[in-house]
Amino acid sequence: MKLSRRRFLQGLAAASTALVVKHGHSAAISSRHSRIIPSSNERIPVVGMGSWLVFAIDPDDENELASREAVIREFLKRGGGMIDSSPMYGVAQDVIGRSLKRIDDHSGLFSATKVWTHGNRQGMLQMEDSRLLWNLPHFDLMQVHNLMDWQTHLPNLYDMKDEGEIRYVGVTTSHGRRHEDMIDVMRSQPLDFVQFTYNLLDREAEDYLLPLAADRGIAVIINRPFQRGGLFKKFGRYKLPKWAADIDCENWAQFFLKFIVSHPAVTCAIPATSRVDHLQQNMAAAYGRLPDLAMRKEMVKYVEKLHG
């Protein structure tokens, strides 16, 4: 692992993008940063969207539903990418499905959800229920949420993939839990995706998970990129450093996200939001210059100095 990690870090600067792109509503989708899914060579945008908490609304409240629909509509209008959810997120899948039903153009959507239960039969029923809630013929990605009963679910997911019912298979964990278990699964299973936590303050994934994903050819989804809003509470009152302009950062959301997606093992980050203006800020992080290895170190130094 030490050799792999050294080789991995040596390639970091070269893999980071230094292209300057002007962006806005009229930006060409082709100018947006994307990453390859190693198992297929398909490309997806580096910034997607999560649904934990922010989609936990009353789906029969028209005003609340309309606000979430507006977020998804804007996301798809700007080219889309991954929308990630789970049965654990309460009514989030219902809200996503109702919104998608009211939006004609779903092009660009990469649908990702999870199985989160014990047992073979319950897992299959839950996944079918999710498909019906999203109102989609199939999901792009099905993940085992927090590794729950993964020994039962993964064989079913591989069969579903072979039969064309899903396109990719993955497993997830969050906020630093079960990293050793995740490593064991990554080493033993032919996964397409893994999902775990990584951000400017939670960098444990740099030690093993990210290098291992690169070595194994596994795409990486990053959850909790803002520490569920915690990073804004810690740093939002401070100004961005002047050198943030060198990586085309106009706000803290872009600063946080560009740190994440500039790591060459990261495929996609999935910040969650219920506001269109915040979504626009998030998606803008997929444009412009990304930090190289030296700049990433400066970003860590800066927030750690502010954090104390």
Image: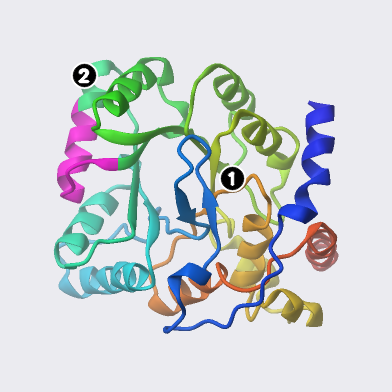
The tag on residue 121 is: 2
Q: Nearer the viewer, residue 9 or 102?
A: 9
Is 130 in the magenta?
yes
Label 1 with label 2: CB-CB less than 8 Å: no
Q: Quadrant of the N terminus?
A: top right
Q: At x 21% / y 66%, what residue is drawn?
A: 105
Crowding at dot 1, Cα within 10 Å, few <14 / some 14-19 / many 20+, comes out as many
Dot 1 lies on which element? strand
Tell me the kind of residue under disc 2.
Answer: Arg
Q: Nearer the viewer, residue 265 or 308?
A: 265
The x, y position of residue 18, in whole percent, is: 71, 68
Q: Nearer the viewer, residue 75 or 56?
A: 75
Name the residue that disc number 1 marks.
197
- Report the magenta stretch's main SS: helix
Per the rendered image, the range of residues in magenta is: 125-139
The x, y position of residue 188, in whole percent, is: 55, 16
Classify residue 201 as left or right of residue 219: right
Q: Is residue 223 shown above or below 226?
A: above
In which quarter of the view is residue 53 placed?
A: bottom left
Classify residue 250 as left or right of residue 55: right
Does residue 102 appear in the picture of this structure? yes
Q: At x 62% / y 34%, what residue is drawn?
A: 213
Q: At x 46% / y 27%, what residue is drawn?
A: 147
Is 238 in the magenta?
no
